[in-house]
Amino acid sequence: MDRRKRFWRWFWLLTVTAAALLAWSGAPLLQVRVAAVFVSVALLATVAELLLIRYPLRPEYRDRGVWLSVSTPIVVATIIGYGWQFGVWLDATVSLTAGLLMVYLRNTRFRWAIVNAAQSVLSAAAGGWAARPILDAPLIGQFLLAVAVALAVYMVVNTLLMSVTIAIVEGARLRWVARQAVLSLPRDIALMAPISAFLGMALLAYGAVGLLGVLAPYLALRQAYIIWAQQQVLYHQTIRSLGFLVQRAHPYTGGHLQRVAQWARRVAEQLGLPPEQCELVYEAALLHDLGKTVLDEQILNKEGGLTPQEWEHIKKHPQLGAEILKDTPFLAPIVPWIAMHHERPDGRGYPFGLKAEQIPLEARIIAVVDAFDAMIGGEAPNQQRPHRRPLSIEDALAELERCVGAQFDAQVVQTFLQVVREWQQHRVIGANT
Amino acid sequence: MQGTWWAIGTAVGSLLALAYYAFVVAPARLHRLRCEGLRAFARLVELRTQGRCGKSDVLADLAGAVAMRLGMRLHERRRLELAVYLRDIGMVAIPYSVLNKTGEPTLAERELLRRHAEISASIAEQIPGMSSVAGIVRLHHVVYSEQPNAPLGAHIISALDDWLRAAEQTDADFATSLLKQGAGACYHPRVAQAILSELSQRSLGGWRELTRSAALWL
C-alpha cells in the first residue's frame, strides 16, 4: 500500500473514532451552567493554542517545521475540574478552531487541522479515563496525583498518535519516530504538571476567571519552549552559516555540498541508521569541506595539474575542518567524520591512513557520495571543478564500483547504487507524468 | 488544611522554579550555545591567518569583565561577547596570499585588510539574530578621536585587541604603557581606565597565560 493510501486510512480511522467519542460524551454540555464555563474556558484555551512556537525540523527546510502550542495544561485542568467529557469537547473545539484559523492565517492544510483535533480528542479521553478512579476521593494528594496521571496519559497517547501520523507521512519507521518523540516527554510532563495543578485549583476555586491568575506561570512555560525552539534554530543556523562561508569562499562547492548532504542522508537512511544519526550525516556532509575555507584559494582554484606540495596543502582540509569545529561541543559527533572523509578501506587515504572498519560508517558514506558528486560535477559552469572534467552518471557509478574495496566501502557503494537507481526511476516517472 | 497549604506551597515553588528556568537559566544556556557556535567562526579565522587574527576566548573573557566594570547591562555584555567572536570573520574574504604575506603589506593590501571589519559586519548581518552585533563588529578597530560616539562595545574590543596584540608581540608591561599613552586619543578614556583596573586586578603571572599565542597548524 502506498504512503498516500495509508495516510488516508489513518486519517479516517482517527476522525471517525474521535467523532464517535464526541457524540458519546456530548450530553453533559447541555447543562446551561457548564456550557457557560465551557465557552469562557474555550476562548482562553484557543488563545493559548494560537500562541504557537515554531519548532524547526531540518536545516534545509527554512519554511517548514512543527508548530507547538501549550494549551495542554488547560485541557488537563478542565478534565480534572469538570470531568473527561468536558475535557474532550474542550480539546476538540480548541484544536479545531485554532487549526482552522491556521488554515486561513498560515496556509496550512485542512486535513492537518482535522488530524490534530482527532488526536487531541483521543488523548483527552485517555487522560480523563485514566484519572477518573483517582478523583473519586476528595483529597489534595489524590487531586495532585490525578493531575499527574491525566497529564502523563494525555501526553503519551498524543505522542504515540502523532508518531504514527509522522511515520506514515514521512515514510519513516514508527519505532524511530516514536523514540525521538518520547525523548522529550519526561521534560514536557515535568514542566506542564505544576501549571496543570495550579490551573486545576484555580478553576475549581474561581471558575474560568481563575485561569487568568495563572497567566504569568503559563507565559513562563511558553518562554521555556520558545528558548528550546531557539536552540534548535541556532543549531541549524550555525551549520547553515558555516556552509555559507564555504560556498562564499569557493562557489563550486555550493551546489556540491547540498547534493552531497542530501545523497548522504538518503544512503544513511537506506543503511538503516537511526533518524537522528541520518540528520547528523546530513550535517557532516554539508560541512565536510569546511577546512577548505582555510586553504589558499589560488591552489584550490588552480587550473591544470597540482604540484605534490600543492596536493599536500589540499590534503590538510579534513583535519582543518575538524579543527575548526573542535571547540563547538554541540557539533562534536560530526567532527571525526569530517576528519576522516578522505580515508580509504585499503589504508591509502588521508590524513590518518586508517583501514576499512577503523573508518566510521558515516565517514565512509560521505567519502562515496563526495567522490560521486565530484566526478559528475555541477550543472552550472561555476560549479565545475577547475582541474577535472565531469563524467556522466553511469561512468561515475562504474568508477565507484571499480574502486570498491580499495577506495570505497563495498556496502556503502551498493546502497548508493540502489539510491541512485531509485532516484533515476522517480525522475523518469516524474518526467512521464 | 495542612495538606492544602503543602500542596499550594509545592505548586508555587514549582512555578517559581519554572519561571527561573525560563527567564534566567535557559537564556544563559542559549547564549553559551551561541558563543560555542560562533567559536567555530573565530577558529576558522585563526587557522586561516596562522594564528595572527581571530583569537577570541581571552578577548571575550576580558571584554566581559571590562564591560561589567563600565556598568554595561547583561544583554549588552552578551552582545559584546558575540561581536568578539564574529569580529574577524571578514578575513575569509581576504586572499590567503595577502593574509599570510611574510613581508610588509603594500598600501593596496593594507587597504584590503582594513576592509575586513566591514565584510565581517555584512556577514554578521546575514546571520539571523546577529544584526544587532553588526554595529560593534563594523567599528571594532575604531579610533576614539575619530569616532568618540561609536558603541562602547566597539571601543572595548578596539583597545583590548590592540593591548593583546602588543602584549603577545612584546610584553604585557609595554602593551599597558601603550594603552596608557593612547587613552583619550586612540582609546576611549573610560574604557582604557577600566582595562587598566581589570589588568591590575588579575595577577601578573596570569598575563603570560592570557597572551599565550595559539599554536600554528599550517
Image: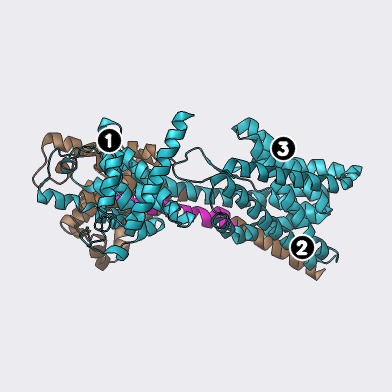
Chain colours: A cyan, B brown
Does the image show residue B142? Answer: no
Numbered circle sitting on residue A97: 3
Residue A318 percent across, percent down from the top left: 26, 54
Residue that numbered label 1 is attached to: A383
Residue at the bottom extreme, as displayed: B2
Residue B172 percent across, percent down from the top left: 21, 59
Numbered circle sitting on residue A279: none
Residue B12 percent across, percent down from the top left: 69, 60
Looking at the rendered structure, the kind of residue marked 3 is Thr
Residue at image position (15%, 39%) is A302
State the separation of the CA atoms marked 1 and 2: 62 Å
Q: Earlier in the sequence, mark 3 or mark 1?
A: 3
- Mark 3 vs mark 2: same chain? yes
Residue at image position (75%, 40%) is A43
Numbered disc in front, either 1 or 2:
1
| SS category of the residue bearing label 3 | helix
Which of the 4 image quarters holds residue B213?
A: bottom left
Q: Which residues are magenta?
A: B20-42
Numbered disc in front, either 3 or 1:
1
State the separation of the CA atoms marked 3 and 1: 49 Å
Q: Nearer the viewer, residue B108 or A168?
A: A168
The chain to which mark 1 is attached is: A
Q: Quadrant of the N terminus of chain A?
A: top right
Looking at the rendered structure, the kind of residue marked 1 is Gln
| SS category of the residue bearing label 1 | helix
Numbered circle sitting on residue A146: 2
Does the image show residue A151? Answer: yes
